[in-house]
Image: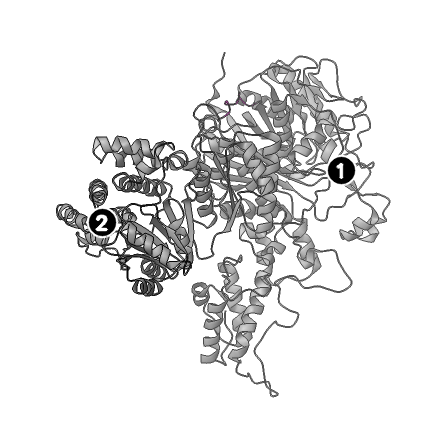
Amino acid sequence: MTRDRSLDIAVTGVAGRFPGSADLAAWWEALVEGRVLTTRYDERRLREAGVPQSLIDDPGFVPVHGHLADADRFENALFRVSPREAEMMDPQHRMMLECAWAALEDAGTNPLATPVTTGVYASASGSGYLRAMLAGGALDPMTLEDAIHGNEPDFMASLISYKLGLTGPAVAVQTACSSSLVALHTAVQALLNGECDQALVVGAGVAYPQAGHLHVPGGIHSAAGACRPFDEHADGVVAGSGVACVVLRRLEDALADGVEPYGVVLGTAVNNDGSAKAGYYAPSASGQEAVIRAALEAADVDGASIGYLETHGTGTRVGDPIEWSAASSALRAAGAAPGQVAVGALKANTGHLDNAAGLAGLIKALFVVREGVVPPVAGFTRLNPLLETGDSPLYVPRATAPWSGPEPRRAGVSSFGVGGTNAHAVVEAPPAGAPPSEGQDRPRAGHLALLSAADGEALARSADRLGRHLAAHAPAAADVARTLATGRAALPERLAVAGRDTADLAGRLAAGAGVVRGRVPETGPAPLVLAFPGQGAQRPGMAVPFAEALPGFADSLAECLGAFEPGLAAELGRALHDPAFPEEELARTRLAQPALFAVEYAVAAALRGLGLVPRAVIGHSLGEITAACVAGVLEPADAARFVALRGRAMQDCPEGAMLALGCGEEAARELLAACALPLEIAAVNSADASVVAGTPAAVAQFETWLAGRVATHRLRTTRAFHSALVEPAVPLLAAELSRTAVHPPTMAWAANDGRLLLPGTEIVGDSFAAAARNPVRFTQALDALARHLPGALVVEAGPGRTLSALAEAADLTAVPLAAGRAARPEDVLTALGTLWTTGQPLAADRLCAQGRPVRLPGYPFAGPRRTAPEAAPPSDTPRRIAGAPAPAAGPTESTDSAGAPVAPDPADVPALVAEVWAELLGHQEPAADADFFALGGDSLLVTRLARRLGTALGVRVPIRELLLARTLERQTEVVAALAAEAPVTAAAG
């Protein structure tokens, strides 16, 4: 009978930090090889960790621990945590934040913008870090409160939800050693009950300090310093440190979103031993057996389908026989055959990870059923004679072996807590994966890979890791682009690279070729301006790179072409899509102008569909019509009709020529006056660039006469636009405009006469006819834009980079979408990536709709080391906790020789405010425009800031004023004003 899979839960992401392993791949490799990953410390390391010499010298002290490297590092800036707050936070909580982030990335989910309601179910061991701080020195009440919030387990789930913006339930689960597997059970129930659509389950067990244990005869800790579950030499457990996290979703939801699970949770159960056991700390065979039976029943599977059991496996003389007996009885009663179920015991490798042990065992079991490989129990020699063998379904694997159990591959995971809370889960191998994304519908344009980080060094590490991963594993490029666009947070430091395929992306990342880097401005993205080029920018096939790179472009282009007369539309279609179309034919005005308008309008529409909405538009000559259309002045169909007429009318004008000069308007006029030829200034493009127009003979004479006086360049046109030679077209254009509806612009529009027309400005229709005759004052239009939108980013929305060069000459940043005459789709993607690196709101997911989430390297955590002084190893001199008051009362108001208050000097206020900022936040020498909250401050810390400043200056500092001021400079101004107005008052907070 087929199982009902509607209650199955997919594990879509995992993350873990385990002893002796750089990452999960290295950890799994060590497990498969049966390596013991615990560490035996020498005396120097023990002393550095702060272990008292008396304990080191104790003959019962065993200096062995499952050591977790770099447990004191924390990427606090990534989580908007100040250095001072990071120092006060238990390393367990820090690493739980980082593991939660990593697991969400592994699941293909943006950690800061999860698309579904996500709950957090978290557990951690007791805080040795907090105990160290309490033992190391006095904490004032406010500092103690901060320490409790950053260390006690009550707050960890909510902290993760707050830092990641998760809105589902946030629940701390504490049942001692079984906590994290109980948290898994709780999360599964929440998903099935509809309380959330995704769940983060995270557990941490990190000792502080990491050192070893004191063996007590008859106790649970190993005298030999080796955990040997089910072995005849088993003499107890060894502690270890670790953090583990999994992401859960309902299976049908995960598969619908294209996520490939690590495995499936079929059922879970939790119970308690009650009082039916030898003592509170003793395990109970009946309780353990019952929880395994309940989990199998919840999973709707029998024991005959189980091929692997990841045990609690502590290696203790009492615990091992009880667990073996209980599991054997439960599985045998459920139909398991003798010797069918391989036993796993992670603690033999890593030591007991305490509250993280259950999740660590779950991840190991998921790897077993996914890979079809059964690792040995590390260090196992011979079965403990106290274990019943007979018809037991269990056996201990001595060497790595391929899966030999029933199919589909299923496993059980047990975790039992001191006090009697037992948990068991049944998992299954993931369903068959979907085929690779790249197929017949693979886009020809290539793919855009986006990376970001909180700082430049992390971004460089991330790019290096991604490049090596792509080279080694070659995932589909569409999947890579999709995962990076939708499954990663968009952080300030950014990088973008476009490539044809995975190998191209990997090569570019390795060589740095074509890689664009940028940083999102603190003030947000620059205002976006679209610039539309005029005639001369056209080239055959110019629509191809846009059509292949920009979603929506083809549809918008087809719609625009539909507004032209059918014969012209067909001819335009050939010219725009065929690079072999005769260039001289496209250069004719009747084709060039409607072709450019159609491409530019379609580009603007496609950019808007990607979230790139301009604040202003500008166009050069013909491009002004496109700008007006995009600004809402002309309807698209009316604009297309007008442009077609404009092209025909100008084609019928007398032949002419145009010459670009490397000088400004005044110098150009002097040259024209000196040569006395019938030429006019047609365009003023910059302070050093202008264009003259006239008959071909006059232009040729002028070019010869100049003889090197100034740089020149003949434009590719056969008409003298913006000169008297096009006057015959003006009446036709004016007549057409008299029948055309003209609207006020909906955005700022920089017209060719140099004016900036703001939204709502009344527009005179025949101004477009006059513009065809009058000179283009593009430099004045750019200057007006720059004044209206300081720091604007200009995007050249059409072929070429002529306008980009002019914008850069006007000190504006410019990005051409298709710069060269041989522009490729990858160039357009690179330009889009450039916009993203500057913080523009590019909807990157629309560029990679064909991809699906895949496993890629996540954030390269390698933050600075953070340890509160009072939690550090003891020294001969007492140290004050970071953020606590000085032994004296801290900064106070000055007094004179008689003890009377002295008015504070406002000149001292800047240094005082900066000093208190540094003390509370841990940021030394903050900049004047630094934001208190961006550096990790919060409302509680503002309260302490107000109290410190008020005490020091003898004034009342209103908290609300500091909340509104935010920056160091503004808060200093507020406090200085208060000090000047009321220099001698009672201190207040």
Residue at 45% over, 46% down = 836
* Magenta stretch, residue numbers: 430-436
Task: Give percent across and percent down for residue 947.
Answer: 52, 68
Q: Secondary structure at mark 1?
A: loop
Secondary structure, magenta segment, majority class: loop
> What number of labels is visible?
2
Tell me, yes or no, whether the highlighted magenta stretch contains residue 435. yes
Q: CA distance from mark 1 to mark 2?
A: 73 Å
Front-lying residue, 422 or 702: 702
How many residues crowd around disc 1 within 10 Å: few (fewer than 14), some, or many (20 or more)? many
* Residue 710 visible in this rendered orientation of the protein: yes
Residue topped by disc 2? 633
Dividing the picture into quarters, in which one does residue 778 lie? bottom left
Task: Give percent across and percent down for residue 508.
Answer: 56, 39
Instruction: Judge left or right: residue 867 versus residue 828.
Output: right
Instruction: Judge left or right: residue 219 versus residue 77.
Output: right
Task: Give percent across and percent down for residue 717.
Answer: 31, 45
Residue topped by disc 1? 38
* Residue 272 visible in this rendered orientation of the protein: no
Q: Is residue 738 depicted above or below 175 in this figure?
A: below
Task: Give percent across and percent down for residue 937.
Answer: 52, 59
- Looking at marks 1 and 2 on the same chain, the residue that comes earlier in the sequence is marked by 1
